[in-house]
Structure formats: C-alpha cells, structure tokens
Amino acid sequence: MDITILGSGGNTPTPMPTCDCRVCVEARAEGVPYARHGNSMFVHDANLLVDTPEQVWHSLNREGIDAVDYVFVSHFHADHTLGLRVMQAVGIEDQPITNFVGNIPTLLMSPVTYERAIKANTVFEHLTERWADIEILADGESRSIGDIELTHRSAPIHEGGERVISALLLEADGRTAFLSPDENRHLDLETLPALDLWVKETGYFTETPDGRRVVTEEAERNALAAEMTFEESLEQVRRVQPERTVFTEIEEQYRRSYDDYRALAAELRREYGLDMAFAHDGMELEV
C-alpha cells in the first residue's frame, strides 16, 4: 500500500493568516515541508481520499493526484469536511460536456457523520445528492476496494459518549495500516491487529521546545478537557507497538517548526526504540 500525506496540519494549518510567529514566517518563506495544509491523506492503491479540509483542492493538485474514486470522512468537524466540494471537481464530466456530471466518487462515512455533516447542512446535502454516491459504514463493517480490505472503526470523543469518530483499518497482502487522523483518545486499541503502520493524531503540546507555555492550565481544565495530549498519544503508541508510527494533525498553535519535529522524532526513537516520525505535507509512506 502506498499512502501520501496530503495535509499534516489540523484545525490551525501552518502558516496561519496574519500570524507573525517564527513558525508561520518560516512556513511562508520556505513552503512545504514547513507549511502544512489541513489533515488529509491519499491511499493510492484504492484512489481513496481520507478527509476533505478546506485546502484539499490545492493538496491534490500539488501531489499530482489524477483520480479520486473514494472519499472517506473521519468525522463531522469543519476542518475535516469543509473541502467536500472537491467531489464536484473530481466528478465533473470531461469535455466536451454533455451531462456535466461524470464518474462521481463514492463517499464513505459513518451514520453519525452522515447525519451531522450532510443531513444537517443544506449545502452539503444538495452537493452530495448530485456529486457523490454515499455509502454508510457501520462500526466494524468492512469493504473491499481492489486488493485492500477497509474496516471502519469508531470511537467517542467523550468517554461513554456517542461513537462519532471514525478510523480506517487497511489490510492487503498481509500488511496492515491504521489511519486515525484525529480524536484518538477513546479508540479501542485492544481490538487492533498487529500494525505495520499507524498514522495517528499527535495530541497537543503544552509548551514550545524552549519551555514557553502555549496552553494554560485553565484551558486544559475546560476547553481542552476532552482533547488528547501528546504524552497520551505517545503512550498509545507504546501500548500498541506498531512497526512504524507517523503523527499527524499538527496544529500551528503548538508553535513548533518542521525542524523541531524532526529533532523530537530522533529523540523519541532513541528513547523508546520505536520507529516514530511526524508527518509533513507530501510525505510518502509505503506499507
């Protein structure tokens, strides 16, 4: 399986408009890999796009993706759905146009994501009526695309809450990859098979590399109470022990640069003896 990280950012991509911090200034000057679009991936073996942030059109163009047959939406949050109009771009008929709509992609999602992202949004509902074949996947349900078997795994955001978060387990030729781009805190890790690759949420940092506080204790008690810290995310990796881990959903607000993440990954590999890296836009992963 071949996977491209289209966007390694999160709700706050890098650079953020109007921000003059060192991370954003560097990203504007250098571009990729210092700049990060919203969280999305592409599985080449299945022509499968995972998540549709606002900048996904540009990400697909940048990486030269010339066909999208399937789109998987991991959850209803705006930073993973606001680029859904990309389906019109990939479904429009080639010229000379006779019917406008051509080969439309299959949109895969959970029942909850369908209700909260499509049925609850008039624009998205009208868009998908014309530009997508919607396929609902129940928790634990599998589907084959070519030689890849996809299994939908769901989880709540809040402990004991509704299972609103989706992840994908991909299996092909005896190899496994688990794609859980965001909200990993309450994933059922005990049911996972041995993983060759895990692309997962980074979790938030409370401080910059030089020790400056970026998240207050008050925010941790309130606004971030349901969010995963990087330490919690790292502990998940230590429990599961995948062959390789790639951390994504890297927020600009963490105020860490591409070089900071490279240094941290090297430190983690030395300390834990596990193959860990931080995603960057355009990163190619082979499983």
Image: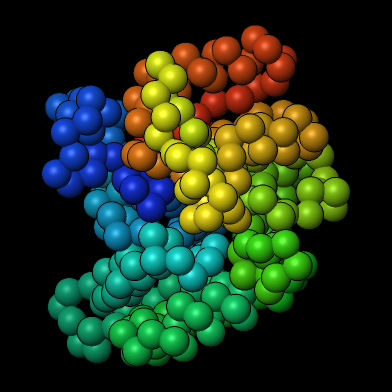
The answer to whether 102 is drawn above or below residue 38 in the figure is: below
Task: Give the left or right position of residue 1, taking residue 280 as reference.
Answer: right
- Where residue 274 appears, as percent x and y from the top left, is 70, 20
The answer to whether 188 is drawn above or below residue 265 in the figure is: below
Nearer the observer, 9 or 147:
9
Give the quadrant of the N terminus.
top right
Q: Residue furthest right?
A: 190
Nearer the observer, 10 or 144:
10
Task: Give the left or right position of residue 245, taking residue 218 as reference.
Answer: right
- Where residue 254 appears, as percent x and y from the top left, is 40, 35
Q: Is residue 53 visible?
A: yes
Q: Residue at x 50, y 80 (%)?
A: 116
Quarter of the image where one finds residue 203: top right
Give the quadrant of the C terminus.
top right
Nearer the observer, 164 or 146:
164
Q: Residue at x 72, y 33 (%)?
A: 235
- Where residue 230 appears, as percent x and y from the top left, is 58, 35
